[in-house]
Amino acid sequence: MFTLAEVASLNDIQPTYRILKPWWDVFMDYLAVVMLMVAIFAGTMQLTKDQVVCLPVLQSTVNSKAQPGMSGKADFTTVETTTGQGEEKDSLGRKTNLDFQQYVFINQMCYHLALPWYSKYFPYLVLIHTIILIVSSNFWFKYPKTCSKIEHFVSILGKCFESPWTTKALSETACEDSEENKQRLTGAQSLPKYVSTSSDEGSPSANTPMITKSGFKFSADKPMIEVPSVTILDKKDGEQAKALFEKVRKFRAHVEDSDLIYKLYVGQTVIKTVKFIFILCYTANFVNTISFEHICNPKVEHLIGYTQFECTHNMAYMLKKLLISYISLICVYGFICLYTLFWLFRIPLKEYSFEKVREESSFSDIPDVKNDFAFLLHMVDQYDQLYSKRFGVFLSEVSENKLREISLNHEWTFEKLRQHVSRNAQDKQELHLFMLSGVPDAVFDLTDLDVLKLELIPEAKIPAKISQMTNLQELHLCHCPAKVEQTAFSFLRDHLRCLHVKFTDVAEIPAWVYLLKNLRELYLIGNLNSENNKMIGLESLRELRHLKILYVKSNLTKIPPNITDVAPHLTKLVILNDGTKLVVLNSLKKMTNVAELELQNCELERIPHAIFSLSNLQELDLKSNSIRTIEEIISFQHLKRLTCLKLWHNKIVNIPSSITHIKNLESLYLSNNKLESLPAAVFSLQKLRCLDVSYNSIALIPAEIGLLQNLQHFHITGNKVDTLPKQLFKCVKLRTLSLGQNCITSIPDKVSQLLQLTHLELKGNCLEYLPATLGQCQLLRKSGLVVEDHLFDTLPSKVKEVLNQDTSIPFANGI
């Protein structure tokens, strides 16, 4: 037989699982243990004492028993055993002719023939039935596909219950809410009417879960508020609470997609109910078969001479009492199973509502859950409803955001933020915040900040405190769909001048961006393909009446129609494509005030005709396209104000002579093309101050370059030039001369005529020495002379001294 400890181990579950055991399951576990004890007790008694004792029935006695009314109360033959003689006699002195061994044989034979099977196997049946009931009760804790979920759930639930966020942090929420109530009661008139008070902003109310309302006491004359002491949530507790929010989110996504635990629990309850009915039915039929008296007909008359025996079962009385006890336990067990089924189907257990928690707390966004997640919470409620209430706090985004705000504000203090403020290229104070959970409150205390950059902050919120930052004029939102309170929006609308928005999809652009009426510069970087153009069209740009600069870095196939809403006001339009071909350009004609236009990497093959209508155009940049010919350049003669033309990084082979018609051109960029020569027409542009033809295949610098008396910057790096014409040094206004990576063998002494030269690049040529006349270039210093070190060493020492003076000049100028 099994020991009680061995069998009871089947009913063992982890102590932490007790919160998932409702009262009926606990009660049934105790009933199962009692049934186990009944089975083991009956089995032990049967193994040690169970037997039958049989005596032969003589013929005369049989006849007398055949009479009516004699069964069960007949006068049994009394047998006298004469020891030592081996003979037995009845009460009349008749011998039975049976010895001791024959009686043992008959007893064993009649135990199997005459004794009913139920009397022999009753303890084993009870044991088997009890084991089945125990397994059925705890199978959902053992089955792998449910055990892992239950174990994970219990682990998270315990941590959520004990988390400091449900005590310390919620106390802070209550205190902050008390202050809000105080302000509302004492100075409601002082608050702006347009301050946002929606729950989306994460504003907690006074009814925070697990926080008593006794802390608020109001007087008839003056509201008095008793604020409980606030305990700061330390960094470790805050990190643990953040991890719990993430675990709860992932667990919910994993468990809510199925109802296996619910079905398994219902199935095992149905099995126990069916088992109860089955046991009750067959036990009721066999209960009467357990009797003290039995008649045995072993059919061994040829061996012993008797055909019938009267037998007694010594365990019958005890087994009957145990059977009655077992039936009583089974009936109680069965009624509890029926109650469990009633509970399972009385309400939809695959749905769980936190409505009561939402009403009692400020976390009104706690979502209702379903399937196995809901069922586990219903089971926990049978143990203690406080568990699910505290667990619900970790399902709330408002709660999570509040925790992030508290942790963030503790970590990013004013002093720490001040250390991260730097000066940018425009000498403005700039703060760059990257991958934070939110925007720290202390940011808005930096009142002298000029530029604020927020990058990869998904829950960024801009509160009314931003109105303190009177110097703020530039804001960067990089993958940061910031939410703005009404007061903050009013401030940004009136003060913000420059806005950078970087996004993945156009829907991420905050709606308030299109309402910043005083915005001067808008930079949009992200996906604006043809499908999303319809979406951006929903938020018209026409409200941006003061917008001057629009920068779009995207993959456009056409200029979005809504850009034309601000076209009359734009002075600069920049479109940087990712290589997508820009086909439709007709909208450009409406941008009559555009002075600067950049269409880069748009796969343009020719200069768009729409550009020729921009009468106020001063600078045109068509960088990184596929332009091969620029014959249309003759039409630029109508653009009287055009001073800068950038056609670099294209596939241009030659420059047409019609370029002479652009009389006012001051800067011409043709680098990184396929030019092999410079036509004389280029040198007729008398106003030209900057000429860049670097990285082409030009072999000769024409002598006509001397005609460009206003030329200040000449770049011809990366070509095939081998000699420098003396006319080049007639351009006495040259400040920058880039001749690197060519085939030049010598530099004429006339370089000394370039008295305003500050930058000279000669590196990558075939030079053997540098002319000593470089020392006469009064503004040239070593930092502006780009040559190999060994060439610099060829200069006379006095020239070197002159050129090395650059280290002290900036210092002197600074003083």
Image (tube, rainbow, N blue to C red):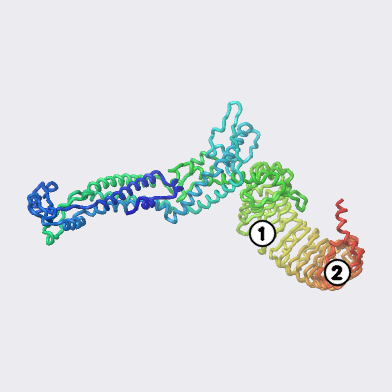
- Give coordinates of residue 676: x percent, y percent: 79, 73
Question: Is 601 rendered above or below residue 286?
Answer: below
Residue type pointed to by label 2? Leu
- Chain-order first, disc 1 or disc 2: 1
Any mark on residue 619, and which? none
Label 2 sits on a secondary structure element that is helix
Question: Is 566 rendered above or below residue 232?
Answer: below
- Give coordinates of residue 256: x percent, y percent: 48, 52
Label 1 sits on a secondary structure element that is strand
In space, the residues marked 1 and 2 are separated at their CA atoms by 46 Å
Question: Is 560 rendered above or below residue 747?
Answer: above
- Give coordinates of residue 225: x percent, y percent: 59, 31
**Which residue bears the numbered disc 1?**
554
Q: Is residue 540 left or right of residue 4?
A: right
**Which residue bears the numbered disc 2?**
791
Q: Determine if residue 96 is in view.
A: yes
